Amino acid sequence: MKALSPERPVIVCPLGEKPSIEAEVAHLLVSLPPRFFLAGFSLGGIVAFEFYRQAPERIAGIALVGSNARPDPEANHRTRARHQERASRGDLAGLLREEMLPHYLSEHCERRAELHELIVAMAHKSAVRFAHQTNYVRRRADSRPMLSSIDVPALLVYGEEDRLSPLDRQIEMASALPDVTSVAIPLCGHFVTLEAADICTDAMKRWMELVED
């Protein structure tokens, strides 16, 4: 965010205030500019699709980082409900360390311990929103039928070793989006925004410059 803000205004929208993804996006749209670039990482990418559903005329471009257009598999629902219950008992940190962090970073990451602590710290700032955020993921729409109708430039950024939004999901989106730029980052897992922050930022800056020319 700091790297992008000297060149253009950057607005960060914390997620999880409203109980549904539809209500959350409708609420956020009230305070956002008439037209804007939209970028989302992971859950943020899922929310970005909902932004486009509700207000396509306001989106100048859409950047999806480590995201996924598919609906949540039913096989995941019981696990997500258990995660919500555990977080509601005040054990979000334990949940992250035991069940979620092992899937977030590449095995090649040399800053694993440092980044794990950073992720836990970031999650604690939104602990009260965790249940709503989990509902957004669990109840998300299948965005694949919409991809071919997204008529603004799109950017896909992803780690080649992402186990949560793997390569086949990225190829699927890239094949359907009419105007897409893909940036695959080697030796990175799901959290490319932390493992390769400079590459992510540079990719986004270059993409916006091309779109604006």
Image (cartoon, rainbow, N blue to C red):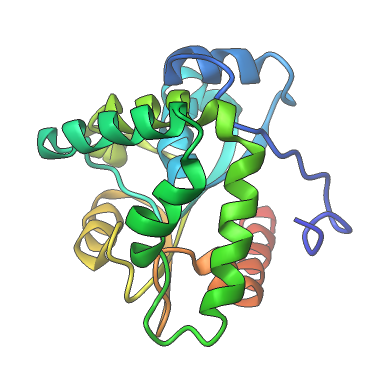
* Image point (46%, 23%), residue name: 132
Whether residue 39 is situated above or below residue 184 in the rendered picture: above
* Image point (35%, 66%), residue name: 102
**Residue placed furthest toward the left:** 75
Q: Residue 140 in the image: x percent, y percent?
A: 30, 28
32 sits to left or right of 48 = right
**Front-most of residues 72 and 203:** 72
* Image point (27%, 33%), residue name: 82
Choose top left, top right, bottom left or bottom right for residue 36: top right
Whether residue 57 is situated above or below residue 76 in the rendered picture: above
Image quadrant holding the N terminus, namely bottom right
**Front-most of residues 173 and 3:** 3
Q: Residue 196 in the image: x percent, y percent?
A: 57, 76
Q: Residue 99 in the image: x percent, y percent?
A: 33, 54
59 sits to left or right of 188 = right
**Front-most of residues 117 and 129:** 117
Choose top left, top right, bottom left or bottom right for residue 49: top left
Image quadrant holding the C terminus, namely bottom right
Q: Is residue 196 visible?
A: no
Count of numbered badges drawn on the protein: 0
**Residue placed furthest toward the right:** 6
Q: Is residue 85 visible?
A: yes
* Image point (78%, 45%), residue name: 10
Q: Residue 179 in the image: x percent, y percent?
A: 41, 53
